[in-house]
Image (cartoon, grey):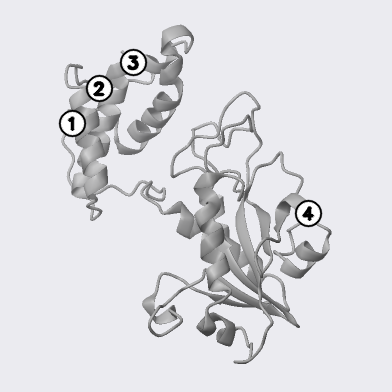
Amino acid sequence: MPNQILFAALHQAIRYLYLSPLQDQALSHLATFSANALSGVTLRRILPTDFQGLHYGGFLRPYREPHRWARLVLRLLGPDPLEEFTGVRDTGLPPFAIDMSKLFERYCEVKLRSVADQQVRPGYNDSSRNLGRDFKVRPDFLVRAENAHWVVDAKYKDDWSWTRDEHRSDVYQVVSYCSHKAVLHELGFGAGSSERPTAVILYPAFPVYQVSDQKGGLDLQAAFQAAPDPLDVLRDFEVDVVRIPVIVPYAAASPLSRVPGDASAAVPAAKHAEPHIEREDGITLFTAFGRFAAG
């Protein structure tokens, strides 16, 4: 029974993907691999009562999270994988193939623009926003406020820190932006100026973090002047590098579960305990996150 539920949901998802305009080679490969792994399972209609007799303890524990998503897929696309359907159905939900890094960038843009005296130049994924001639760059944001200047990069990564080897390249990237002549010109620095902007890296904050109030927007000047923890400022380069956690929307949470590590979650899965972002039907607060980022 547990594998029949997964196989039915997978079959429905594959049919839906093949009928949709979205054609992604990585998704197709993953779908084929998963279908082969379940090839010996009987394909049949799944009833709501099939979920009721399952108790997710012992060997069934790993099925708890996949079954939540399977239940959602079957509710949206139909419980009977043997029933013919044509055309792409309107599910009323955003697709799961979403670049959460880009969504987090747009969310940060909304928060930065919410501060009245901050001038924000976003990079977007647009070659027309490139800066430079022979070596073009495109920082996520260039921000100005009075005499302060920042080069800002948004990193949708779990507990971002320059002390982690996998995040060191992010520091090199934003520091190099701060030395790029075209970036300095865009920020208003003269050709002979020795001044440099401050590098800022934004990353998602978990609810357990102690983060200053950001309801009025993400005020970089206030964040920098609030005497941040020394661990949040790196002074090993000619420019300071500041890391700032960004509050993202969360639902009321159960402390017993983990954040699902998939594209529909509002933050990436963490390696430590934190509240679960979930409503009764398993849909995360991603939709609210997306609506807010859309402005």
Foreground label between 2 and 4: 4
Q: Is residue 215 left or right of residue 50?
A: right
Amino acid type assigned to the residue bearing label 4 in the image: Ser
In the rendered view of the protein, which quadrant contains the N terminus? top left
- The quarter in which the C terminus is drawn is bottom right
**Which is more N-terminal, label 3 or label 4?**
3
Task: Tell me the SS state at disc 4.
Answer: loop
Q: Secondary structure at mark 2?
A: loop
**Which percent across, then down, holds residue 232?**
72, 53
Label 3 sits on what residue type? Pro
Most foreground residue, 208 or 77 = 208
> Quadrant location of residue 210?
top right
- Which residue is identified by label 1? 83
> Where residue 289 sits: x, y (%)?
56, 53
Residue contact at pointers 2 and 4, CB within 8 angstroms: no
Residue 218 got which mark? none
Which residue sits at x=40%, y=24%? 67
Disc 4: which residue: 212
Observer-nearest of 121 and 265: 121
N-terminal label among 4 and 1: 1
Q: Which residue is mark 3?
A: 2
Q: CA distance from mark 2 to mark 3?
A: 13 Å
Q: Would you name the residue on which mark 2 appears?
A: 45
Front of the two marks 3 and 1: 3
From the top left corner, tell me how far across and down residue 75 is, in percent.
37, 33
Q: Mark 2, mark 3: which one is toward the viewer?
A: 3
Does the CB distance between marks 1 and 2 fall below 8 Å? yes
Q: State which tag comes first along the sequence, 2 or 3.
A: 3
Q: Upstream in the sequence, badge 2 or badge 4?
A: 2
Element class at badge 1: loop
Amino acid marked by disc 2: Arg
